[in-house]
Image (cartoon, rainbow, N blue to C red):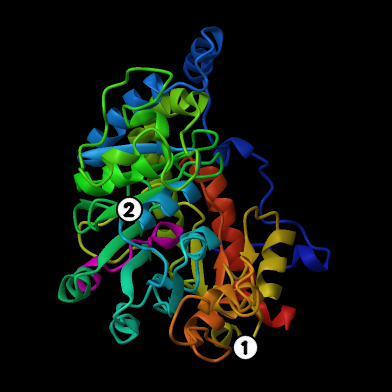
């Protein structure tokens, strides 16, 4: 057991617990000559705006993901937007989504003329609470958007059962959990469609880009038709093979049905192909490091383990690792004060709170984005779908009972042990901070 030997807090002038400044433990993404040469090959032949490299990346990614189709997009928001439309989210419909997540999980629905019915989150997993979904379903509900937040897979079994009961689509937002497993199945393959960001900060990072994955041919074709005009086979610039076969879409081939240009630029696709070759090994390194860390701090007072608990499940690349926090265990010490003390000890990557609850933001209450003469959130519904303060208690209080923790990319035990020592030092001597 690692114990804290120096009890004088750095925040009060004592020595820091973390003295090793090894940023290699945290460096990400890993870019090598192989990535650089792949990008240069695209640049040298002026193929940045083509699709040939992207289509190779899609084929390889679909095989890795274990699904039938993958569609490269210019970012994760575009992938989510396309997935919503492809799944039937249109004017006058509704989606159900968790309130605690990045805005792109839900906000594109407003562009489609739909409304968002925010659900509360589970206090332990921080993902959508399956018990807060069914009572929100109306005749207008079309999809449940699930987020595998901070690498923790949402509890998909009950969610899929609800979706089947009411004939709803399920869209998985995999932006925080590339490669994560839920009971042996890769997240993104369980619902009707998966969508994810691949920007440079993500665990699967290609620079800027997104990916839509599905086993449903119609969803794939609709996503192509929505924002990839040049891949429908009707482009005036090429005689590309036709990507769509659905008779209802064919008359509109050649122009994007959504009026969007969502293709992935091929510099990102080139990086993505290289990153995919090494991702499993690098992901295992992250999992080894994070599991090593958690095994040594899971009994620290005030810090609540946030690691997937389902059988045959993993945290994938563990994007934005989080922890629960219990102030009562530390005499009421706030999470802000706890994190400030850790930062003073030399700990990098800690911060109080996590994503704020979206349902309380003014954008979802009073913004008239498209000039409807009423708030966009309920402009196309037959009811006021807005939720005020106090309606989703777990989501609204998450800021006081959660924190971001260091995201180790390599299992350097010498570095991690110092971080463990810092957590133990602060928690063991918390009274000095009150």
Please name the residue shown 43% across and 77% down the image.
117
Horizontal and vertical percent position of residue 413: 49, 44
Q: Looking at this rendering, what residue extends furthest in the top direction? A: 44
In terms of depth relative to the viewer, which is nearer, 97 or 225? 225
Please report contact status of discs 1 and 2: CB closer than 8 Å, yes or no: no
Q: Is residue 149 above or below residue 270?
A: below
The tally of labels here is: 2
Q: Vertical placement of 366 versus 215: above or below?
A: below
Determine which quarter of the picture holds residue 313: bottom left
Picture quarter with the C terminus:
bottom right
Most foreground residue, 211 or 247:
247
SS for dot 2: helix
Q: Is residue 78 left or right of residue 138?
A: right
Q: CA distance from mark 1 to mark 2?
A: 51 Å
Instruction: Say whether disc 1 or disc 2 marks the residue closer to the N-terminus.
Output: 2
**Residue lying at 22% horizontally and 47% vertically, measured from the top left:** 218
Q: Which mark is residue 86?
A: 2
| Whether residue 8 is situated above or below residue 108 in the rendered picture | below
Position of the N terminus by quadrant = bottom left
Q: Residue furthest bottom?
A: 390
Write down the region rendered in magenta.
147-159
**Residue 291: x percent and y percent?**
39, 54
Residue carrying label 1: 331
Q: Is residue 66 magenta-colored?
A: no
Q: In the picture provided, is 46 more to the left or to the right than 284? A: right
Classify mark 1: residues with Cα within 10 Å, few (<14), some (14-19) or many (20+): few
């Amino acid at each position: 057991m690692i114990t804290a030997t120096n009890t004088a807090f750095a925040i009060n002038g004592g020595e820091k617990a973390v003295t090793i400044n090894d940023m290699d433990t945290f460096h990400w993404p890993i870019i090598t000559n192989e990535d650089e040469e792949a990008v240069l090959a695209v640049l040298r032949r002026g193929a940045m705006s083509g699709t040939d490299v992207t289509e190779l990346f899609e084929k390889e990614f679909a095989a890795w993901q274990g699904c039938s189709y993958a569609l490269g997009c210019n970012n994760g928001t575009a992938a989510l937007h396309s997935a919503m439309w492809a799944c039937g989210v249109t004017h006058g419909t509704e989606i159900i989504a968790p309130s605690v997540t990045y805005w792109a999980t839900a906000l594109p629905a407003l562009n489609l003329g739909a409304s968002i019915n925010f659900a509360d989150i589970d206090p332990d997993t921080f993902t959508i609470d399956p018990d807060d979904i069914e009572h929100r379903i109306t005749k207008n509900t079309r999809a449940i958007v699930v987020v595998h937040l901070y690498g923790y897979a949402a509890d998909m079994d009950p969610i899929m059962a609800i979706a089947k009961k009411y004939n709803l689509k399920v869209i998985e937002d995999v932006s925080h959990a590339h490669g994560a497993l839920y009971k042996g199945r890769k997240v993104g393959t369980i619902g009707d469609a998966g969508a994810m960001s691949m920007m440079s900060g993500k665990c699967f990072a290609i620079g800027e880009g997104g990916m839509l994955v599905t086993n449903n041919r119609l969803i794939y074709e609709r996503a192509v038709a929505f924002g990839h005009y040049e891949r429908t086979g009707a482009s005036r610039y090429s005689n590309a093979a036709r990507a769509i076969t659905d008779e209802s879409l064919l008359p509109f081939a050649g122009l994007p049905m959504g009026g969007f240009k969502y293709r992935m630029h091929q510099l990102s696709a080139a990086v993505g192909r290289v990153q995919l070759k090494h991702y499993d090994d690098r992901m295992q390194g992250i999992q080894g490091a994070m599991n090593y860390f958690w095994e040594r701090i899971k009994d620290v007072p005030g810090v609540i383990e946030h690691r997937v608990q389902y059988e045959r499940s993993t945290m994938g690349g563990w994007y934005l690792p989080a922890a629960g926090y219990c102030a009562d265990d530390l005499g009421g010490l706030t999470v802000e004060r706890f994190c400030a003390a850790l930062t003073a000890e030399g700990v990098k990557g800690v911060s109080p709170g996590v994503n704020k609850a979206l349902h309380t933001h003014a954008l979802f209450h009073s913004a008239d984005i498209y000039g409807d003469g009423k708030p966009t959130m309920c402009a196309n519904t037959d009811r006021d779908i807005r939720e005020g303060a106090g309606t989703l208690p777990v989501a609204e209080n998450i800021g006081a009972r959660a924190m971001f923790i260091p995201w180790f990319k390599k299992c350097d035990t010498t570095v991690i042990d110092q971080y463990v020592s810092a957590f133990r030092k602060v928690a063991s001597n918390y009274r000095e901070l009150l």
